[in-house]
Image (cartoon, grey):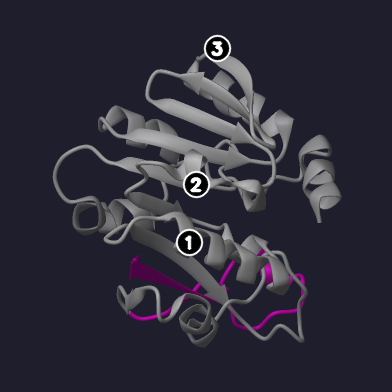
Amino acid sequence: MARDWHESWAEGRTGFHRPDVHPQLQAHAGRWLGEGPAKILVPLCGKTVDIGWFLSEGHEVVGVELVPQAVAALHAGLERTPETRPWGRLVAHESPGLTILEGNVLDLEAAHLAGITHVWDRAAIVALPPVDRIRYAALLQQHLSPGSQILLVSFFYDQALMDGPPYSVPPAELRQLFTPCAAIEALGPAEERIEGSKFVERGLDSFMEQVFLLTR
């Protein structure tokens, strides 16, 4: 799996990257973040411009990214030159208000998540195969403090028609992964995202997206 992501970045296959701030983030940020600055975890962050938006709003961000090329692209986009140091099994790239942890998200430890109050999972859980999803959900529930909130965008479709990533993670699986440690609320109905999508070429006739708010 790690090799696939390295190859995607090396070959420029980064169609999953959005050039704009995610619309679901903008739609739900008010309720999810509330008032005042937050410390936000962005797992599998790539070079997302969402991080720049968080910083401009006064929040502190901890991103996690496996691919060094993506880490470099993120900092180039932000016009930052971070200080770098080893931190556990990860490498920390630090600049004011921002820490990018280079390495496997499953290697996160309690110290990495200290003070995290919010998690923006824009496409992390759907990028992980089933066994890793279990470990990822358990890790968040183990190390996040009660009251922490996860804003999560999930996809679901007929997995028999297309293999991931992105994988299909329907609401029932989310509840299985996070219950009983988190309250799960769907923020609106599932919406179809198949028209004009690259997934038609991969054999799908239906591809649904839904946003959830999880409270630890």
The answer to whether residue 182 is above or below residue 84 is: below
Q: Is residue 161 left or right of residue 94?
A: right
According to the image, label 1 marks what residue? 142
Whole-percent x, y for residue 202 in the image = 77, 72
Disc sitting over residue 81 in the figure: 3
The image quadrant of residue 148 is bottom left
Q: Residues within 10 Å of mark 3 (few under 14, many from 20)?
A: few
The image quadrant of residue 93 is top right
Span highlighted in magenta in the image:
189-216
Question: The residue under label 1 is which amino acid type?
Answer: Gln
**Helix, strand, or loop for circle 3?**
loop
According to the image, label 2 marks what residue? 110
Magenta highlight on residue 52: no
The answer to whether residue 94 is above or below residue 215 is: above
Whole-percent x, y for residue 94 in the image = 51, 21
The image quadrant of residue 13 is top right
Cβ–Cβ under 8 Å for marks 1 and 2: yes
